[in-house]
Image: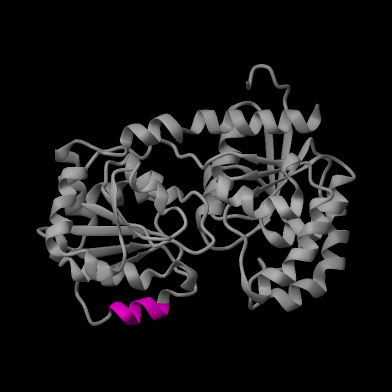
């Protein structure tokens, strides 16, 4: 596809200061498009963008919308719409957070097609209802909405209509997330894990530390199984979670890390703690590609992936007994082939190039 499509300028507008799945998706798309010969520029901030030497420019937008910043964010919309004049002309404008989608799509769409990616299920409650009317109006100006799962597309169909929706499941770099030889794994355990974990069964999870992710269940499941737990990530819930785990030497918080593939390789199994709005969780794909068995919880969005990726779905943390955790050893490597065949990076980039080409066609 990349040989048939002329060089594009893909302009990403995104402001985020905390690393997460959507941010990793943004960086991967920027890297991939650049490697295929396209020009890519970010207006705003995104963790990991600068580390890969991708082009970035400042734009004076307020913080990412959240329950805490929503009211002030809505008041800033007229000013932030005017700031789109600072953004250079582009072939495609790419947006994925609600503030950028709702506030900036209409003015940008007058200059070039706008593409959104939706990473999760539509949020419920008062905040979801508040956003819905503005989202529907903004969607009148979007060219395509990329949904990471069929469930996400089903949520949006009543609001947007099916003609603008396209499903492209998340993908990972399967060359980066791969199971190492036993000797390498042993060396990684020695170097990366606390010494008290060296002779233990070790569970791991990698996710933004936010209340919606419900890390409490992962901590409880690991402790119920007698396993040590490594929690990778940062976010607003870190202080509370560290207090929760403070009474146990079996829980270790690493904060944000760039060496996630190595940390996964040092562990024995993965615990997925899904949020209610999750779409296709890349953390599950990464763990499966690295050969780790996965434990998830019934009815969590994304848990339907786990049996395909080699793992176990339980009802509550107490069900992960020491015997069941020990039996996970026989599931190692069970998801590698599935992830390589269905969630590789190259076919994912092909899909995005095709979508951008359609928008310009």
Residue 57 in view of the camera:
no
Residue nearer the viewer, 3 or 161: 161
Q: Is 305 placed above or below 2 here?
A: below
Magenta stretch contains residue 312: no
Is residue 203 visible from the viewing direction of this image? yes
- In this picture, is 223 found above or below 268? below
Identified at 32% across, 36% down, the residue is 336
| Viewer-side residue, 206 vs 323 | 323
Task: Determine the residue positioned at 51% across, 28% down.
Answer: 346
Is the stretch drawn in magenta largely helix, strand or loop? helix
Task: Name the residue at the top extreme.
Answer: 4
| 119 sits to left or right of 57 | left
Vertical position of residue 120 compared to residue 128: above or below: above
Q: x, y (%) of residue 342?
A: 44, 33
**Outermost residue toward the left?**
199
Please report the bounds of the magenta region as a residue range: 239-245
Counting from the top left corner in percent of width and height, residue 330 is at 16, 44
Q: Which residue is at a point 67% across and 28% down the rendered structure image?
A: 354
Residue at 27%, 69% in the rendered image: 317
- Residue 187: where, in percent of width, then height? 17, 46
Residue 236 higher or lower than 88, as above or below: below
């Amino acid at each position: 596809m990349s040989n048939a499509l002329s060089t594009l300028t893909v302009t990403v507008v995104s402001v985020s200061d905390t690393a997460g799945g959507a941010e990793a998706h943004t960086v991967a798309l920027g890297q991939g498009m650049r490697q295929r010969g396209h020009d890519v520029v970010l207006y705003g901030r995104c963790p990991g963008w600068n580390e890969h030497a991708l082009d970035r420019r400042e734009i004076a937008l307020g913080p990412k919308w959240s329950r805490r910043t929503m009211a002030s964010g809505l008041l800033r919309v007229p000013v932030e719409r005017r700031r789109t004049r600072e953004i250079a002309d582009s072939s495609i404008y790419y947006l994925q957070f609600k503030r950028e989608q709702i506030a900036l799509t209409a003015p940008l769409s007058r200059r070039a097609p706008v593409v959104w990616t939706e990473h999760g299920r539509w949020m419920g409650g008062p905040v979801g209802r508040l956003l819905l009317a503005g989202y529907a109006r903004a969607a009148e100006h979007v060219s395509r909405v990329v949904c990471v799962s069929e469930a996400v597309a089903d949520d949006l169909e009543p609001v947007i209509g099916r003609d603008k929706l396209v499903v492209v499941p998340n993908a990972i770099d399967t060359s980066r997330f791969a199971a190492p030889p036993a000797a390498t794994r042993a060396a990684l355990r020695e170097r990366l894990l606390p010494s008290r974990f060296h002779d233990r069964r070790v569970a791991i999870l990698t996710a933004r530390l936010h209340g919606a992710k419900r890390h409490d269940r992962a901590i409880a499941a690991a402790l119920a199984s007698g396993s040590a737990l490594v929690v990778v990530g940062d976010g607003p819930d870190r202080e509370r979670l560290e207090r929760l785990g403070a009474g146990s030497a079996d829980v270790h918080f690493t904060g944000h890390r760039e060496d996630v593939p190595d940390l996964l390789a040092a562990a024995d199994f993965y615990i997925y703690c899904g949020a209610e709005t999750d779409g296709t969780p890349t953390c599950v794909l990464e763990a499966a590609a690295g050969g780790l068995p996965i434990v998830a919880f019934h009815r969590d969005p994304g848990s339907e992936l786990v049996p395909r990726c080699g793992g176990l779905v339980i009802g509550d943390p107490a069900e992960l007994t020491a015997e069941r955790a020990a039996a996970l050893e026989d599931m190692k490597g069970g998801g590698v082939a599935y992830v390589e065949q269905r969630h590789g990076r190259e076919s994912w980039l092909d899909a995005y190039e095709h979508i951008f080409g359609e928008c310009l066609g």
